[in-house]
Amino acid sequence: MPTITEDCIDGFQQYYARPPERPKKKSLKQMIYDSEDNSYFGRSMESWAKIGIFYVAFYGVLAALVAICMWAFFQTLDPRIPKWTLDRSLIGTNPGLGFRPLPPVDNVESTLIWYKGTQHENYKHWTDSLDDFLAVYKVPGLTPGRGQNIYNCDYNQPPPKGQVCDVDIKSWSPCTKENNYSYHKSAPCIFLKLNKIYGWIPEYYNDSRDLPESMPASLKNYIGEMEKTQPHKLNTIWVSCEGENPADQENIGAVNYLPVRGFPGYFYPYQNSEGYLSPLVAVHFQRPKRGIIINVECKAWARNIIHDRKERIGSVHYELLID
């Protein structure tokens, strides 16, 4: 039986013994295929087959699980009805107001409409931009599903289910393509559009005795006249465009609205119907003062539309400069 001293000597000798010689490095050809053990890249064909079958089965099951999860998820969605609407959605219940034409894309943050009325090439960008924007309103085929389901709506004739209201802009003279949208006369037309919110129902100002104090006097008078002459048209989201400051109000001149001063109520609520197009209002600035920047603020008026100039809620701002 070895003593403790002998064990220590044996352990010492093993610790300092020469390590076993490693096999010689294989050439690249041998790494790809070794004829000695009939292996490819260090594995036999049987080993590669087992690994291949494992990974095919593993990723196949993984892909099937992902496909089942995606299928179950899409079963909860409707292609036309958002899952979250109104107060439960990120958009909320306060629609925004937009304007066209927009400045060039290289100056996307600007809201200035600036041109020389006597030079066609100078105002060509603005009229071309309106042509592009209004093309879908002129040619039904440009909007998917729009055509046979167009309905000539009116205040006492809302669209039947599955049909959408027509927006006939061809008769909105002088705000037409044939008239260069009146840009050549230094009296430009600006088109307003209310953002779409699924299921949103406007609460109208349809009583001249119950109008907000902040509403412009000209709009109050307009609503009063409509109440006397065409009371069936009072269910409208009214629109006003004024100069933001006293100086702007002096320089803006007369303003006309086409076809009416607001968005007709029969376009609402928005249900994402196939072929639907938002209603428009053309704002015709008839005699704006030339050579000076005019700050313009347009507002949409309904009881459930909040206005906040700082946040640009329920309104839109832009500037006019006509040389």
Image: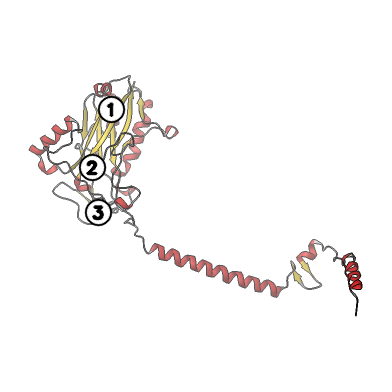
C-beta proximity under 8 Å, tags 2 and 1? no
In the image, is 289 to the left or to the right of 58? left
Q: Earlier in the sequence, mark 3 or mark 1?
A: 3
- Residue 221 at x, y = what percent? 13, 32
Q: Which residue is mark 2?
A: 168
Q: Which mark is residue 183?
A: none
Q: How is the image coloured?
A: secondary structure
- Residue 262 at x, y = what percent? 21, 39
Q: Please state, as top left, top right, bottom left or bottom right, where the C terminus lies in the image.
A: top left
Q: SS class of the residue under badge 3?
A: loop
In the image, is 70 to the left or to the right of 215? right
In the image, is 40 to the left or to the right of 126? right
Establish if 43 lies above or below 316.
below
Question: In the image as oriented, which residue stretches furthest toward the top?
Answer: 291
Mark 2, mark 1: which one is toward the viewer? 1
- Residue 94 at x, y = what percent? 28, 44
Q: Which residue is mark 3?
A: 149
Establish if 294 lies above or below 62.
above
Q: CA distance from mark 2 to mark 1?
A: 31 Å
Q: Nearer the viewer, residue 279 or 248?
A: 248
Which of the 4 quarters of the picture holds residue 168?
Answer: top left
Q: Which mark is residue 244?
A: 1
Establish if 191 lies above or below 56.
above
| Disc 2 residue crowd, few under 14, some 14–19, many 20+, Cα 10 Å | few
Question: In the image as oriented, which residue stretches furthest toward the bottom?
Answer: 1
Q: Please state, as top left, top right, bottom left or bottom right, where the N terminus lies in the image.
A: bottom right
Q: SS class of the residue under badge 2?
A: loop
Q: Earlier in the sequence, mark 2 or mark 3?
A: 3
Residue at the spot x=16%, y=44% of the render? 235
